[in-house]
Image (cartoon, rainbow, N blue to C red):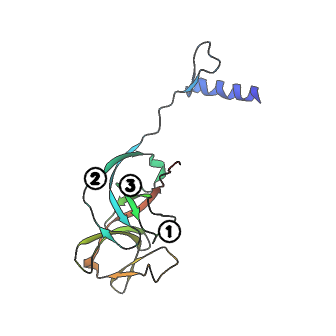
Amino acid sequence: SEGWAAELNEKRGRRGALYKGPGASRGLRLTTPPAPRLRLPLVGRIAAGRPILAADQVEDRLEVDPGLFRPRPDWLFRVQGWSMRNLGVLPGDLVGVREDPDPSPGAVVAALVPDPHTGDRLLTLKRYRRRGGQVVLLSEHDDQVEYAPQVYAPDAVQLIGVYAGLIRPVTVP
């Protein structure tokens, strides 16, 4: 009801959360400061599919709501590929990654892996497992032929960090 809303606004005003301008019937405004924002580097692309060449340069710095991520990320990467689609990670998404060179098995990780043809270090996003002394990186996709597990010797893989969440950019037609 109108009376309930007026009472609620009065209480918020007494607590200092709302300010009502003098003589203004619609002059309410919030007085609490906006939530703190994270300023994260958008480092480049990360493969959710076949690994892609790792780029060590910052493309941009984006301010994001820290509530979007758990744990708090250190970097953002733009996703390329479909291998993590069952996790809800799609091409074009920005994934937050928290630095963690020693993640728990079962975690979704960003990892640098060797290109089998050139030896270049490639960056990929996969679920991390250990099996028989090997590092196994698994996709989150129903097609396990196209997105087969990747198996590496432990010294061939550099675990960069753990997946912390994503931002899905929205384009308006």
Secondary structure under the numbered disc 2 in the rendered image: loop
Q: Amino acid at mark 2?
A: Val
Q: Amino acid at mark 3?
A: Pro
Query: To which residue does mark 3 refer?
Result: 73
Cα–Cα gap, marks 1 and 3:
20 Å
Q: Callout 3: 10 Å neighbours few (<14), some, many (20+)? A: many
Q: Which mark is residue 85?
A: 1
Secondary structure under the numbered disc 1 in the rendered image: helix
Q: Which mark is residue 51?
A: none
Q: Which mark is residue 58?
A: 2
Cα–Cα gap, marks 3 and 2:
15 Å
Sequence-wise, the earlier of marks 1 and 2 is 2
Looking at the picture, does residue 171 appear above or below residue 52? Answer: above
Q: Quadrant of the N terminus?
A: top right
> Is 34 positioned to the left or the right of 76 in the image?
right
Sequence-wise, the earlier of marks 1 and 3 is 3
